Amino acid sequence: MPRVIAVDVTKCMGCHSCEVACAVAHSRGKTLLAAIQEQPLPQPRVSVLAAGEMAVPLQCRHCEDAPCVAICPTKALQKPDSEGPVIIDQELCIGCKSCIMVCPFGVITMSADGKSIIKCDLCIERLNEGEDPACVEACPTGALQLVTVDELAARSRQLAVTELVATIEKQS
């Protein structure tokens, strides 16, 4: 069953812990102390953006029919498993930025050296070891959770029903 990172913006306090954890997870040293000594500094694959009075963590949505994969001229971006993440082969990436232009979420960025792109890979190594992505594990409020698509749909249905009942009760 495909899993996605669900975001509850009402719980996000904009602490950026997810960004730090992501950068550390994608660093060579894999610890905060080692990561801050690396050159260039490791880059996060998740960004926390302000939206009014809320903070919204954004990362790759690993689209079923990913436009970034379809447009990549070197096949550096792949979705090898229909239930898995879109991943990048840094060695194949030529830095053409086509994927950046077509990403509907704007979550693909250039690496610090400008030679290739970087994007969320759901911390594939961690997933393969049975662990949650680093951003999910680091979130102190539970605003980020790794869930199945069915769980996400069930949450949405429950929220819609709760809001409907509240509206009806308010009108009574």
Image (cartoon, helix red, strand yellow):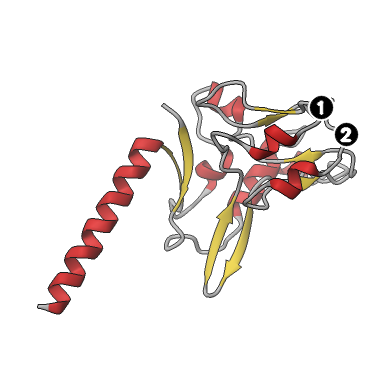
Question: Which of the image's four quarters has the N terminus?
Answer: top left
Question: Which of the image's four quarters has the C terminus?
Answer: bottom left
Q: Give the vertical position of 154 relative to 88 (above or below).
A: below
Q: Report whether 97 appears left or right of 55.
A: right
Per the rendering, the mark at residue 74 is: 1
Mark 1 secondary-structure assignment: loop
Q: Do labels 2 and 1 touch, CB within 8 Å?
A: yes
Residue drawn where x is 66% and y is 37% of the image: 25
Mark 2 secondary-structure assignment: loop
The foreground one among 116 and 39 is: 116
Q: Earlier in the sequence, mark 2 or mark 1?
A: 1
Is any atom of residue 44 visible in this view?
A: no
Badge 2, how many Cα within 10 Å: few under 14, some, many 20+? some
Is any atom of residue 143 visible in this view?
A: yes
Residue drawn where x is 28% and y is 50% of the image: 157
The foreground one among 10 and 106 is: 106
The image quadrant of residue 115 is: top right
The image quadrant of residue 79 is: top right
Q: Position of residue 7 (x, y in %)?
A: 47, 52
Q: Give the vertical position of 119 relative to 171 (above or below).
A: above
Q: Give the vertical position of 35 relative to 78 (above or below).
A: below
Q: Report whether 141 appears left or right of 109.
A: left
- The kind of residue tagged 1 is Thr
Q: Compute the Cα span from label 2 to label 1.
A: 8 Å
Q: Report whether 164 appears left or right of 93.
A: left
**Extreme left residue here?**
172
Residue drawn where x is 86% and y is 39% of the image: 95
Q: Position of residue 57 (x, y in %)?
A: 57, 55
Disc 2: which residue: 94
- The kind of residue tagged 2 is Ile
Badge 1, how many Cα within 10 Å: few under 14, some, many 20+? few
Q: Report whether 50 appears left or right of 149.
A: right
